[in-house]
């Protein structure tokens, strides 16, 4: 599935004042920065257990209650729901629209009159934005978190923190692993993290 970049190259460079200090940035830096934006955007999806791009997707789940959570929310529409009470893919049957509905939370489908242990397959369209421009306009906190994290990655790439340098061999050691920033985590947890849906 496609990853939606949560900011643009131009906005990241402006935010970090990259190339504005009078010193030219190395050739190929735009490609590196663009790949960092995509990398951070995908890491955010993984951390939040959700896809941000508005697109068609399929949710497959063994029914434990009446709700089937989805990775792309809010749900915009449901194309079909199939249920196999045996739990086997070969027994899937498309059910009438009266047998399900989008839950008010927008992140799950409520299934009516299906037994626990049934296999449910939901074909739906969901996500928060169709394009990066929509993220910038409608989700400034998410875009801001992406800029902060991508800039941190760029700074570490261009000026790595070192705990030591062996001149003879040229070996470099890092102070610590690259991790998500504390403020970024807080913004994602408060506004976009869906991990609780899949517990």
Image (tube, rainbow, N blue to C red):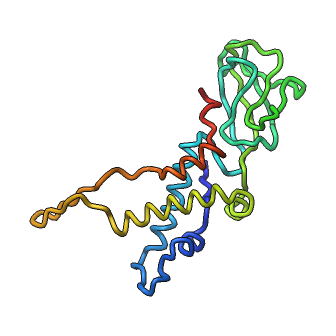
Count of residue discs: 0
In the rendered view, does 95 fall on the left or right side of 32?
Answer: right
The quarter of the displayed image where residue 198 is located: top right
The quarter of the displayed image where residue 60 is located: top right
Return the x and y of residue 70 as percentages of the image width and height. 69, 35
The residue that appears at 71% across and 13% down in the rendered structure is 116
In the rendered view, does 81 fall on the left or right side of 14?
Answer: right
Return the x and y of residue 175 as percentages of the image width and height. 29, 54
Q: Looking at the rendering, in which quadrant would you find the C terminus?
A: top right
The residue that appears at 82% across and 34% down in the rendered structure is 104
The residue that appears at 26% across and 60% down in the rendered structure is 162
Tell me if residue 186 comes above or below residue 148 in the rendering: above
Farthest right residue in view:
98
Viewer-side residue, 198 vs 176? 176
The residue that appears at 60% across and 67% down in the rendered structure is 8
Farthest bottom residue in view:
22
In the rendered view, does 53 fall on the left or right side of 104?
Answer: left
Viewer-side residue, 6 vs 175? 175
């Amino acid at each position: 599935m496609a990853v939606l970049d949560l900011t643009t190259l131009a906005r990241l460079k402006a935010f970090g004042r990259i190339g504005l200090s009078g010193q030219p940035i190395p050739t190929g830096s735009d490609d590196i920065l663009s790949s960092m934006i995509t990398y951070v955007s995908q890491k955010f999806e993984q951390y939040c257990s959700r896809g941000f791009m508005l697109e068609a997707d399929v949710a497959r789940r063994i029914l434990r209650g009446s709700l089937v959570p989805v990775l792309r929310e809010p749900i915009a529409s449901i194309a079909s729901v199939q249920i196999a009470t045996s739990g086997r893919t070969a027994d899937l049957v498309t059910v009438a629209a009266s047998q399900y509905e989008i839950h008010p939370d927008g992140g799950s489908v409520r299934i009516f009159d299906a037994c626990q242990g049934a296999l449910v397959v939901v074909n739906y369209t969901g996500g928060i934005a169709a394009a990066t421009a929509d993220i910038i306009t409608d989700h400034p906190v998410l875009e801001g978190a992406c800029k902060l994290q991508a800039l941190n990655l760029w700074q570490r790439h261009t000026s790595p923190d070192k705990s030591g340098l062996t001149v003879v061999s040229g070996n470099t050691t890092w102070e610590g692993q690259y991790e998500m920033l504390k403020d970024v985590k807080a913004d994602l947890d408060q506004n976009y993290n869906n991990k609780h849906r899949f517990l």
